[in-house]
Image (cartoon, coloured by chain):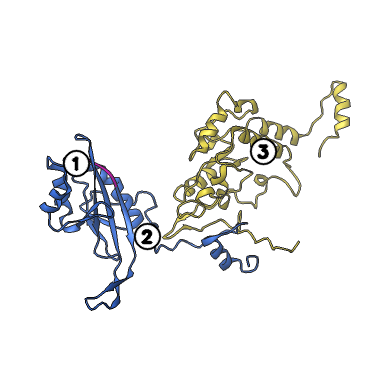
Chain colours: A blue, B yellow
Amino acid sequence: MNIETLTRQFPQTAWDVHTRSVIVPHVCLLDVVYFLKTDPEFSMDYVSNVTGVDWLARKEKTKGPDGKESEIEKPGFLEVVYHFYSMREKRGPVILRCRTDDRENPMIPSITPLFRGAEFQEREIYDLYGIRFSGHPDLRRILMWDEFQDFPMRKDYQEPDDYEWEPTPHDEVLDRAKQHYAAPHP
Amino acid sequence: MAVDEGLQSELQKAGVFVTSVETLYNWGRRSSIWPLQFGLACCAIEMIATACSRFDLARFGAEVFRPSPRQADLMIVAGTVTKKMAPQVVRLYNQMPEPRYVIAMGACAISGGPFKQGYNVLKGIDRYIPVDVHIPGCPPRPEALLNALMYLQRKIDGQRLTGTDKVRWYDETDPAEFPVPEFGAHDLEPPFNRAVWGPQEPIQRGAA
């Protein structure tokens, strides 16, 4: 199994050496997954894990051609990570990472038509990260209640303010303790 | 009115048994507390172990786990109460007939436990229903649950049927039903029932 076969077949994809994964644009995700599933060199028949990552907007320092350092604003996005294994050939994993265009209207094609096992994992990602999967047969919240509107695993999630007094607050809990009970926590 | 213990013992020697209705009532109640067959997480496994032969909850007359809230006296909240589960727990409690008792078993049920700072776990079931006995532990040993049951039995022994400190269910003004929280857009609505729970006031250092 040579991952270069994949990147050669799909020139839009890119191998990321740090995370040992293939970054796939969402327009060709289904084609890549279908290729991984059917190609005899890979024959990935098992999707072990589907999960999400939230990348906030950040500033990055770059050096221009004139040697001047400048800061550029990198927009935030959400990412879905897939781990594929081949049970038949006993190999893997092949890790795919698929990024959304933005954090406001995140949309990624669903791989549930190809791998039934991804159905609940995609529902969980929708529930906690708010990424919508086009083509998913039953995209509802799975863990939180249907009336819930937030996405709690996003990094900018604001949880409801129901702080309770604690005897030994520390770190973030200490900050909240200071907000709620100014006097006893110097 | 309690019977004088010395007089009671003297009369008993003469073959006369004297007691009060209150004692009889409480004796009956404490001797057959039927728990609701209801578990939420890992604490329920300890509850099952308590009910099995090694620890044997039957010694205390509480072995009849009822699958219906209509036949149960005791709700053992055994495990993590998620915010999604909390309305169902309150609804089950509302469906239980009086007299009813609640044991909050384990760190999660009494305060949220290790998940207290999380987004989906209720920070203690005592936010919505009155709890009689709290058992700390993660999970508590079966002995702790037995101890809680014995504590509850002692509590039932002290119940008064009349007077100003009479039990809740003989007081017509007290609510028999507790409001079931609704699923809100960000949290349960309301986040707690003010009639049974309020945020704890901070302990002032150096005061007292």
Q: Badge 3, how many Cα within 10 Å: few under 14, some, many 20+? A: many
The verdict on a common chain for dots 3 and 2 is: no
Highlighted range, magenta: A43-49
Q: Is residue A107 left or right of residue B170?
A: left
The answer as to whether the residues below labels 3 and 1 share one chain is no
Q: How far is mark 3 from mark 1, CA to CA?
A: 58 Å
Mark 1, chain letter? A
Indicate the secondary structure of the residue bearing disc 3: helix
Q: What residue type is labelled 1?
A: Met
Label 1: how many residues lie within 10 Å, few (<14), some (14-19) or many (20+)?
many
Q: Name the residue under label 3.
A: B152
Which quarter of the rendering shows the C terminus of chain A?
A: bottom right
The type of residue carrying mark 3 is: Leu
- Placement of B129 over or under B16, stated as above or below: below
Reading the image, the residue beneath label 1 is A44
Q: Is residue A104 magenta?
A: no
